[in-house]
Image (cartoon, rainbow, N blue to C red):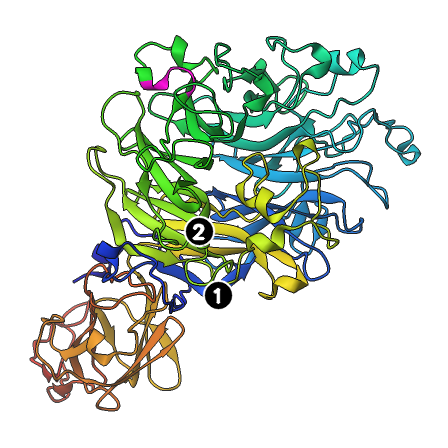
């Protein structure tokens, strides 16, 4: 068997695996029908990989992640205090992570502003010693066409007026702290910030336009404190542009209240952002309709007791449909249509054309996607179809192979029993689809103190599967960890999604934040919420208007591998309140063999299939791309004399001992050194990674050892007279006998 047959379609990237911590609990992570199963999933790394470098002196939180296939790196963006600034001046930072090794990679851009290996992205406020302006809730997406990232966030920036001739004069602006808008920055693959101001310095590009122009003028330069929060961003690979959506409570002219009374009612708005070249700058920036409205929460004015600001649409998420060149935007809202009431949050969605035109104006779109299409039906079957049962903070991913979306959220089908759910949606709005399938099993309907919260989802084209991640506390109340569940994505949606690899599996082993840890404190995490709401355990856990704090985020590389990031305690002690960003790399492909070497006891040399060796061998070593769960089991390998052998061949073979160091298995033959002859070394398909993914097939290498010279039978010396200028032709016979 040739090695290349095993390597077809595999990426031979060095990924070091570590074991999944054993979950010992009196409570089950799985549904009863799965309780007997084993979760076979691969978590890479010795432990949670620390990504942020703010703690212990400062805090880092609210991460998001995107993948660059060109550099094989992830960009993780998160919130932390500005290096050199005050403890309460928060900015957006980025960190490159090598997808193969997990190593933190510093940017190579010449003017990158570093904090360790992380680099600053946002330029919020005045950069003074005491700066009241903050940036939060970053979201990131990658453009393969331009090899750049777009990072969006919310901030109460100053919109400073800059004097390029007198930079030391300070930066003046009209904004006041606490009024949040959406900003973006384009980040190159080397960390260079490509959006610049007129002085050539990195500059945040404001996307939303709430507290400016008409509003500012009508309020005589006073800030009305309307906010744009929770940005989401996705990339259109056909048009080379991004879509940014958010939730804001600006005054809207169609409301019935007087102008001075408007605000406080959140809707979803979006803006397209182009990467096409511009004559005067590298990017055009905002294109198309400005801050266009896509949600209609509370638009049913015929409702009894109608008070428009009581209805909100919040926390959007976006997926791009590459087959139809469309967007699908989802959000959580307490609409007053489709049978819901004030305070009863459900998940809604809207299909948009690439240019932002809404679905009700598109041809060939089913009735399911006309305006605010309701996706979740929380509590409908449990007599809890009211404000006591809700669906919050949706996530969405797209499957181009089936032209389907998977929408995920957390909610309480029964009052107080919060778990994670998913709904499979057909892109056209027609046909059957799975709706409200339960994913997490923290409470199992027994104890509502145990929850599944804060969900994200990604699609892997390599294995055609979905990965859903969330935080939950299924074993110890308020000890939240990061969990995952894989689902088969190659389905028409007529039946519930089939789980892959068993039930819910543990991803993170560093405690994430529990609800009690969300209370406002003096360590740098206190910040205002919409409407002046106090930041308490209840508001952060349940209030859908609030920003994500520890919600895990996941990205797929489309090679069977994922990266999940979240915020958690640095040392697991809640009282210390030191938050940091962590991540785990996951792999769901067979553990490939990277290298096979042989040693004579002094030197080590690669061993190739079919090699002829003239040196003795005392050791053979197989290095895998991951650590193996059963790597030290001798029966996982075979060493036979001859060239025809399989892992099913009967024992005994020629292996004396097997030992493992990290991902390398060392095989010591019985006889030292191996005698001359032909051999076959096999790594058997029964070998698995520490997460349980089996070797795809037997890996075999044949080689020949020939250290003994042949025995030659040569004629005696022959003397012949030349018969011409070229000499003479002499005929003789010679034979050789060789052991190999």
**Residue that mark 1 sits on:** 47
Q: Nearer the viewer, mark 2 or mark 1?
A: 2
Q: Which mark is residue 451?
A: 2
Q: Is residue 463 visible?
A: no
Residue at x 15%, y 81% (from the top left corner):
677
Q: Residues within 10 Å of mark 1 (few under 14, many from 20)?
A: some
Depth check, front residue: 62 or 546: 546
Kind of element beneath mark 1: strand
Residue 208's x, y, as percent? 64, 22
In this picture, is 25 found above or below 512?
below
Q: CA distance from mark 2 to mark 1?
A: 24 Å
Q: Is residue 608 above or below residue 582?
A: below
Pinpoint residue 401: horizontal percent, then vertical percent.
27, 33
Q: Residue at x 30, y 78 (%)?
A: 632
Camera-side residue: 537 or 64?
A: 537
User: Around disc 2, counting alpha carbons within 10 Å, would you say few (fewer than 14), some (14 to 19), or many (20 or more)?
Assistant: many
- The residue drawn where x is 51% and y is 18% is 298
Between disc 2 and disc 1, whose residue precedes? Answer: 1
* Residue 385 inside the magenta-drawn segment: no
What range of the chain is rendered magenta? 368-372
Residue 673, located in which quarter of the rendered image?
Answer: bottom left
């Amino acid at each position: 068997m040739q090695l290349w047959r095993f390597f077809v379609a595999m990426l031979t990237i060095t990924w070091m695996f570590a074991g999944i911590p054993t979950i010992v609990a009196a409570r089950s992570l799985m549904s009863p029908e799965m309780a007997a199963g084993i979760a076979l999933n691969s978590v890479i790394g010795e432990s949670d990989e620390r990504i942020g470098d703010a703690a212990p002196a400062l805090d880092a939180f609210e991460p998001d992640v995107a993948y660059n296939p060109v550099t094989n790196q992830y960009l993780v963006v998160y919130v932390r205090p500005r290096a050199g600034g005050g403890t309460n001046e928060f900015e957006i930072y980025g960190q490159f992570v090598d997808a193969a090794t997990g190593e933190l990679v510093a940017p190579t851009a010449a003017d990158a502003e570093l904090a360790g290996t992380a680099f600053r992205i946002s330029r919020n406020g005045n950069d003074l010693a005491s700066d009241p302006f903050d940036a939060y809730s970053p979201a990131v997406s990658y453009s393969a066409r331009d090899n750049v990232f777009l990072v969006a966030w919310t901030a109460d920036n100053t919109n400073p007026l800059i004097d390029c001739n007198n930079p030391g004069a300070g930066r003046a602006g009209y904004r006041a702290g606490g009024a949040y808008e959406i900003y973006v920055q384009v980040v190159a693959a080397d960390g260079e910030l490509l959006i610049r101001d007129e002085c050539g310095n990195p500059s945040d590009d404001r996307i939303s336009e709430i507290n400016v122009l008409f509003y500012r003028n009508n309020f005589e330069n006073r800030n009305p404190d309307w906010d744009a929060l929770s940005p989401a961003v996705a990339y259109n690979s056909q048009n080379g542009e991004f879509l940014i959506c958010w939730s804001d409570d600006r005054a809207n002219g169609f409301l019935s209240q007087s102008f001075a009374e408007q605000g406080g009612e959140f809707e979803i708005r979006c803006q397209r952002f182009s990467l096409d070249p511009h004559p005067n700058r590298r990017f055009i920036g905002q294109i198309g309709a400005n801050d266009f409205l896509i949600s209609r929460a509370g638009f049913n004015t015929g409702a009894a007791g109608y008070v428009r600001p009581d209805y909100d649409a919040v926390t959007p998420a976006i997926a791009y449909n590459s087959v139809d060149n469309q967007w699908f935007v989802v959000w959580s809202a307490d609409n007053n249509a489709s049978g819901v009431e004030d305070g009863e949050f459900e998940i809604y969605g809207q299909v948009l054309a690439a240019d932002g035109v809404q679905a009700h104006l598109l041809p060939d779109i089913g009735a399911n996607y006309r305006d605010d299409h309701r996706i979740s039906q929380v509590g409908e079957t449990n007599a809890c179809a009211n404000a006591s049962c809700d669906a919050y903070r949706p996530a969405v991913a797209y499957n181009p192979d089936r032209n389907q979306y998977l929408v995920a959220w957390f909610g309480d089908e029964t009052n107080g029993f919060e778990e994670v759910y998913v709904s499979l949606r057909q892109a056209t709005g027609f046909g059957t689809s799975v709706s409200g399938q339960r994913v997490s099993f923290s409470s199992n309907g027994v104890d509502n103190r145990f929850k599944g919260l804060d969900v994200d989802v990604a699609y892997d084209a390599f294995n055609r599967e979905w990965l859903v991640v969330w935080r939950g506390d299924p074993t110890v109340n308020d000890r939240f960890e990061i969990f995952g569940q894989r689902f088969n994505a190659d389905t028409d949606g007529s039946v519930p999604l089939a789980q892959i690899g068993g039930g819910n599996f543990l991803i993170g082993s560093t405690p994430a934040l529990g609800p009690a840890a969300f209370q406002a404190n003096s360590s740098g995490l206190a910040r205002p919420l919409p409407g002046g709401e106090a930041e308490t355990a209840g508001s952060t856990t349940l209030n859908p208007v609030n920003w994500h704090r520890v919600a895990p985020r996941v990205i797929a590389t489309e090679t069977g591998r994922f990266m999940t990031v979240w915020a958690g305690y640095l040392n697991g002690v809640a009282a210390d309140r030191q938050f940091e960003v962590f991540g785990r790399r996951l792999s769901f492909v067979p553990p490939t063999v990277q290298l096979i070497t042989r040693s004579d006891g002094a030197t080590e040399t690669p061993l190739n299939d079919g090699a002829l060796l003239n040196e003795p061998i005392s050791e053979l070593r197989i290095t895998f791309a991951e650590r193996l769960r059963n790597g030290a089991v001798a029966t996982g390998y075979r060493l036979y004399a001859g060239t025809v052998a399989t892992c099913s061949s009967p024992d005994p073979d020629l292996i004396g001992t097997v030992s493992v160091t990290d991902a390398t298995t060392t095989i010591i033959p019985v006889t030292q050194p191996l005698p001359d002859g032909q051999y076959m070394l096999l790594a058997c398909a029964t070998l698995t990674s520490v997460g349980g993914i089996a070797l795809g097939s037997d890996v075999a290498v044949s080689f020949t050892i020939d250290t003994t010279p042949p025995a030659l039978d040569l004629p005696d010396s022959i003397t012949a007279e030349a018969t011409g200028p070229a000499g003479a032709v002499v005929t003789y016979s010679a034979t050789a006998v060789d052991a190999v």
